[in-house]
Every structure is written in C-alpha cells, then in structure tokens.
Image: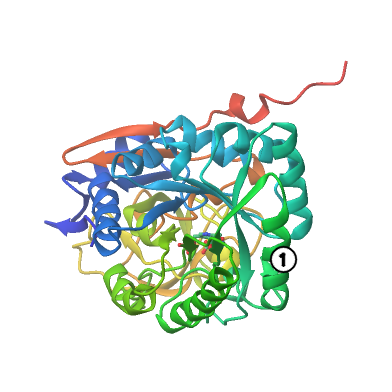
Amino acid sequence: MHYFAYRNDELYCEDVPLARIAAEVGTPAYVYSRRTLVHHARVFRQAFPEALICFAVKANSNISILHTLAQEGIGADIVSGGELFRARRAGVEPENIVFAGVGKREDEIAAALKQDIFMFNVESIEELNLIQRVAQELNTTARIALRVNPDVDAKTHPYISTGLRENKFGISMDSALMDYHYAHRLSHIQVQGIHCHIGSQLTTIEPFIDAFKIIRALALELIASGIDIRYLDMGGGLGITYEREKPPLPMELAHAMAPLMEDLPCTLILEPGRAIAGNTGVFLTQVLYTKQTEEKRFIVVDGAMNDLARPSLYGSFHDIRPVQLNTSGEEPVKVDIVGPICESSDFFARERLMPACHHGDILAIMSAGAYGFTMSSNYNSRPRAVEVLVDDDQYRIIRRRETLEDLIQHEELPQ
Ligand SMILES: Cc1ncc(COP(=O)(O)O)c(C=O)c1O
Ligand SMILES: N[C@@H](CCCC[NH3+])C(=O)O
C-alpha cells in the first residue's frame, strides 16, 4: 500500500500535489511519504510480532527516515561505521543494531563494540579473529552470528544475489559446524545466532524457505552440540512491485515460516530494506528538452544516473508518471527518457510508451525510496538532490539540496 495517487489529473503524495513540491523545492528531488513508511513498518511488525526487525540502512539512510522507523520499534541493519553513526544519530538504540558486511575495518569494529551493538554478522574467520582481538583490547565481549552461505538461488538479478556458493558473502555450509565450534572457544566472542541473506528483490517465497530450512537444520545441530543459538537472522530480500511483480507479503512469509519456527528456541531477526522503503518514495525530475533523431524520440530530463542509478546499473524498470496528466488529447509516444550525463547508460527508461511530454513537465519516477538517494553520487559534478518528507498535507525538507560550494568543500588548491 502506498499513498501516491492521482486526484483530478494531479499526482499527489498523501495530501500534497507533487507539482507543488517540485515548484517550491525544485528538481531533481526525492519525495517520501511518511504515512507509507509507517504503514510498511507496522505491516512487518504485525506479521512478525516476536521478531527483531532491523531496517537495512543501505536502502535509505536519511536520518529522518531512520528516526521515523525507530519510533515504530524498527532497528537498524548496518554495513559500515557511517551507517552506525547515522543510525545512532537517528535515535536507534544499540540493542536494535546488527552489523553485516564482508569488509569491516578495525575502527568500525571498535566503534560498534564501544556502542555495544546487538550483534555482529561475521562473514569470515579472519574477521572473527579481528573482532576477538579488538573485543579483548576493549575488555568487552562481542555477540556474534556467523553469516552462512546456504547456496540457494534467489532467482533475482545476479548483481544482487548473495546466497550462492560463488558469491563473496558468508562462510560455506561445509565448514559451518567447525567454524561455529572455533568461534565458541574464543574468549571474547559470544556466539548467539546464525545469519543468512540470499539476495534482494525476491519475488517468490520458495528460495527464502529453502534457505530457512537449511539454517534451521544447522541451528538444531548446533544446539544439540552445545552451542546456544538463540537468534536466526534471515536477512532482508522481500521484493516490491516495480512493474507487474507480485512479491509475497510479509504476512505470507510469516505464515510460511511459522511451522518451521515452532520447535526452535530462537527469536527471528529480519533485515528488510526495499520492502519497507522502496514504495515510500518517488524521484521528481523536470523535462528539459524533447528531441527527435532518425532513430528515436528522446525526453531529456534534469535527473540522471548519478541521482538514481538502478536503471543504468541493473537495467531496472521504474514506472514513470507525469505529475500532471496531459489532457490535450495528444497520442502517447514511445520514448527514451535520459539524463544529462555523458554516458549512454544514463537512462531511466527505454522504448517506453509515455503520454506526450513537453519542456517544463515534471515526471515522477516511482518506487525510488530504496537504493535511490543512497546510491547517488556527484558524477559530472552534479550536486545531490534535495530530499523531502510528506506528512499528510505538509512536507518538510529532510536533506537540503547540495550547493556548488558543497561540491568542492573537501578539496584544496595547490599552494
Ligand atoms: C545483509 C543484508 N541484509 C539486508 C539487506 C536488505 O535487502 P532488501 O533491501 O532486499 O530487503 C541486504 C541487501 O540486499 C543485505 O545485504
Ligand atoms: N542496490 C540494489 C540492492 C542491493 C542490495 C544490497 N544487498 C538495488 O538497487 O536493487
């Protein structure tokens, strides 16, 4: 469910017309719906009332978004010291923070230990040894899960599939028992869980359940051998509708998992990112030019791949809608919607049938609330877009547009 809809030919976010926001804050702009965000958080909490839900900060790391989720009882799944900093600044309690990632640096591990986060999701034995050493130096104990790689095909885009043997993530199932017993013997490590995340934008339930069966069997084996596994962290990965996908709802996942949880003395942890944030946001961009070549018709907009990288990076589909419907009766046309960046991969849509667009029109690129702003860059020296949070009939800027001065603030001229 989301709160973006047309009323009288105008696209609204909650009770605010998107055209008004574009006119007042300019474009390109990310616009999020608070109501949608809160609704999605509650849907997860209702589906998994006993679970610890940790929002994957990489999906959307704006501190207002994290704060809103924290107020709904949602923690944070972090992958860097930067995300730890953001989560804490947003008011996420350390006991609701889990830390994954194959390349945690020593300073990041130390910062997380000092904050006493809930759990490290450890991805290699070398990392485990480093956490043990840092914990010893800080005279503390690190609570950990080992991230295991169940070798399950998530049937998603290969770049965002993470649970296959060939992927860099986690430890192999073959050595899991041995690795757990090794971790169990370390003086400053407290083994408390198993972690697994097989990929993102999953649109069927089966790979998730296949992985869960493998994790469940491992948990039972570890418990029988004297290792106190209390938490099963199944990562994130639930997909959303970008086009016509029909991904499972959190409640369907909960029902499918429930029988497999019954005899386990474990609490579930989930790390949804996209399913919570994806459809809470749109990216607004303005049409600069239209241009007809012998081959094609192009719509050149003021947003680009540096603002929203998904189409250029994965060839992802995002629905694109005019914020004001064209009522002139002009026929829809097939167009490429492209940005100003000097790369042919700088597109938002190709060969897309769109209502006729003209200079000055505002387009909303839908489903941009996850992996949108967080993956943006300053490529082509383009300042990052403004971010706005709508709340009923009002909106607030939650990150101001970067200025040209911001672009060079960390640079020095030679003396
Ligand atoms: C370890 C981990 N947890 C959670 C997520 C969030 O995934 P999603 O946004 O698909 O829910 C990811 C990214 O795929 C991840 O790598
Ligand atoms: N960045 C990806 C998702 C990556 C998930 C991270 N583990 C996307 O935009 O779809």
Image quarter for ligand 2 equals bottom right
Q: Quadrant of residue 407?
A: top right
In this image, 301 relative to 254: left or right? right
Query: For mark 1, does the 10 Å Cα neighbourhood hold few (<14), some (14 to 19), or many (20 or more) residues?
Result: some
Q: Residue furthest right?
A: 415
Image location of residue 207, percent across then percent down: 48, 81
Which residue is drawn at the image coordinates 16% and 39% (left, top)?
393
Depth check: give the residue in front, 179 or 48: 179
Q: Which residue is located at x 55 percent, y 63 percent?
A: 195
Which quadrant of the rendered structure holds the C terminus? top right
Q: Quadrant of residue 43?
A: bottom left
Q: Can you give x and y, in whole percent of width and height, for residue 242 in the image?
A: 38, 69
Q: Position of residue 278 (x, y in %)?
A: 39, 58
In the orientation shown, which residue stands out farthest toward the top?
415
- Disc 1 C-beta below 8 A from ligand 1: no
Colour scheme employed for the rendering of this structure:
rainbow
272 relative position to 142: left or right? left
Residue at the limit of the structure toward the left, as seen here: 8
- The N terminus lies in quadrant: bottom left
Left or right of 386: which side holds 374? right
Q: Residue at x 30, y 39 (%)?
A: 71
Kind of residue sitting beneath label 1: Asp
Residue 366 visible in this rendered orientation of the protein:
no
Residue plotted at (29% across, 50% down): 37
Q: How many numbered circles does the render carry?
A: 1
- Left or right: where 379 falls relative to 292: right
The residue at which mark 1 appears reads as: 179
Residue 27 appears in the rendering: yes
Q: Closer to the camera, 336 or 160?
A: 160
Residue 158: percent from the left, percent from the top? 61, 76
| Depicted 158 relative to depicted 168: above or below | below
Element class at badge 1: helix
